[in-house]
Image: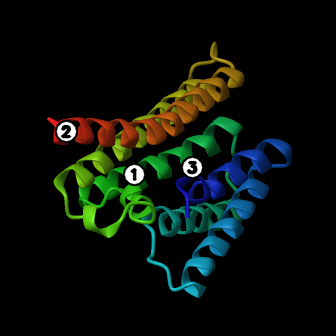
Amino acid sequence: MSILLGLSPFLTFFALMRLVTPIAGLIGALAVSSLLCLRMWRRSESVKILEVGSLILFGLLTGYTLLAAPRWTVATVRLAVDGGLLGIALVSLAIDRPFTLQYARERVPEQYWGLPIFLITNRIITGVWAATFAVHVAADAAAEYVSAIPIWLDVAVSIAAFVGAVWFSRWYPAAVQRRALANAAR
């Protein structure tokens, strides 16, 4: 499964939040998170931090929204979701299980999993994703609490950061591999 599939609950949330309502986004994301976790369970795949974290995050936010009925603005609900996503990335780094590691193991032969460079590469990539999510949180907070900043700027900054993280996640492992091959050839 790719990291983009793992992020699909968040993409679902952002689309439905903008097209329908914040609660529709939360419920849609919870449904997608549930389906991803069910898929992993049915296929006997390893449990992934991102998918389980997403399920917990959207379950809690949906429950809170249905029970407490907060008056979410676009920026505050995005702030809550992006803050949760940042939390997932930071926890995965703190427990030394970068969330990208689980996706990398699906693409990289097992013989490389124990190499220090494999773990370091995934720490760096997860760090870039954490930085991306921190940019999202900052943009959301600015859009909510600084009246001069329009919501479209929040969205534009978030999209640019996301695209940058996707690009880096594809480019960096290839660069590490090229460097390792060049060093081995010397």
Question: Which residue lies most toward the right here?
Answer: 20
Tell me how the rendering is colored. Answer: rainbow
Q: Quadrant of the N terminus?
A: bottom right
**Disc 1 residue type (three-letter):** Ala
Q: Residue at x 53, y 39 (%)?
A: 166
Q: Quadrant of the C terminus?
A: top left
Whole-angstrom CA distance, mark 2 to mark 1, is 35 Å
Q: Residue at x 63, y 45 (%)?
A: 77
Residue under label 2: 185
**Viewed as shown, does residue 62 lie left or right of 50?**
right
**Viewed as shown, does residue 41 lie left or right of 150?**
left
Whole-angstrom CA distance, mark 2 to mark 3, is 46 Å
Q: Quadrant of residue 114?
A: bottom left
Q: Position of residue 150 (x, y in %)?
A: 69, 19
**Foreground: disc 2 or disc 1:** 2
Whole-angstrom CA distance, mark 1 to mark 3, is 13 Å
